[in-house]
Image: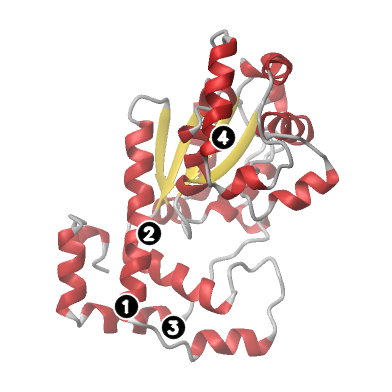
Amino acid sequence: MRDLMESDVNEINQRITDSDKKIFKVFESPQISEKDVKDYLPYANSPGYMVAITPRSGSSYFCDLLAKTGKLGRPNEWINPNLMPGMLKARPANNAVQHLINMRKLTAGVNGLFGIKASFFQFAPMIDTKLDGILFNNFKFIALFRKNILMQAISLYIATETDVFHTNVQHAPEKLSKVDSFEYDDETLREWVRHIYKQELEWNKYLVNKSHVTIYYEDLIQNTSAHIGMVSTYLGIPIETPVNPEDSVFKKLGFDRSESIYNQFMDNKTNIDMMSELRISPERYLL
């Protein structure tokens, strides 16, 4: 991380002040100080990586297994503003720099390796305020996307409407029954497709000059162990004992309703036209 002048810190603080992003509103005093930057310096050259995700791409499963290696830290959504109040209650911080120092101390693995995952919309405030240049300057990135973007959007649509996101919690039968009887709307599903695809495009734009690898959900599920091994090699941290994918608390949520929604959606030419207008290749939505 390059030396930051007082003017740089002032610019960052002005951008934070001007921002309306939720992440800065969780702090009482979100502005950073030169002391915060100096406090972060010991960590700035420590190894770190970000799992750059789009939603419903298997990131909870993937990061759970990375953590279970015992070597690669414990990547999670440390800058998710919806989750941060609980983190800050346990480990108070005045701003994002202090918060990331706390998360590093808590979750870093071998050789200080620190992992984090974020959707692009969670990460965008870091870019907008130039905080990414402080907090993630030397990070390696692992992009985690999904090949079939339509099935991904269906998964996200169902999850947000029914609150059935993961298998690591016991869902009440009445909640699961909402999935089977779920009624969808074409325009809403089109919006979820746009939501996911925009994040993927923005990640690709950001990562073009960054050290990164790209993994697709479908390939990860097909050969999980090989992908965990590839990531450990990429991060320079060998794993002596391979992890068992069955050890993850996260399992695939497979619902018959997803396929029927897919078929209904594909029967509407307006929906196909929308994906063509977005320049989404048919390979990204045809089963």
- Within 10 Å of disc 3 (Cα), the crowding (few <14, some 14-19, many 20+) is few
- The answer to which of 257 and 182 lies nearer the viewer is 182
Identify residue for label 4.
Answer: 16
Q: What residue appears at the point 37 percent right and 33 percent down from the top-left corner? A: 206
Q: Which residue is mark 3?
A: 256
* C-alpha distance separating marks 1 and 3: 10 Å
Label pair 1/3, CB-CB below 8 angstroms: no
Q: Residues within 10 Å of mark 1 (few under 14, many from 20)?
A: some
SS assignment at label 1: helix
Q: Which residue is mark 2?
A: 195
The residue at 17%/76% (across/down) is 270
| Residue located 61% across and 49% down the image | 80
- Helix, strand or loop status at disc 3: helix
Q: Position of residue 239 (x, y in %)?
A: 63, 32
169 relative position to 66: left or right = right
User: Mark 1 touching mark 2, by CB under 8 A?
Assistant: no
Q: Earlier in the sequence, mark 3 or mark 2?
A: 2
Say which of 284 and 25 sits in front. Answer: 25
Q: Indicate the amino acid at tag 1.
A: Tyr
> Looking at the picture, how far across and down is residue 110, in whole percent?
71, 26
Look at label 2 and name its amino acid.
His
Choose top left, top right, bottom left or bottom right for residue 228. Answer: top right
Between marks 4 and 1, how big is the CA–CA gap? 41 Å
- In the rendered structure, the answer to whether residue 131 lies left or right of residue 258 reads right
Q: Is residue 41 above or below residue 123?
A: above
Gap in angstroms between the C-alphas marked 4 and 3: 45 Å
Answer whether residue 136 is visible to the viewer in this image.
no
* Residue wearing tag 1: 262
Residue 127 lies left or right of residue 166; in this view the side is left
Q: Amino acid at mark 3?
A: Asp
Q: Which of pointers 1 and 2 indicates the residue nearer the eye?
A: 2
Q: Say few, some or many: other residues with alpha carbon within 10 Å of mark 2 (under 14 / 14 to 19 / 20 or more).
A: some
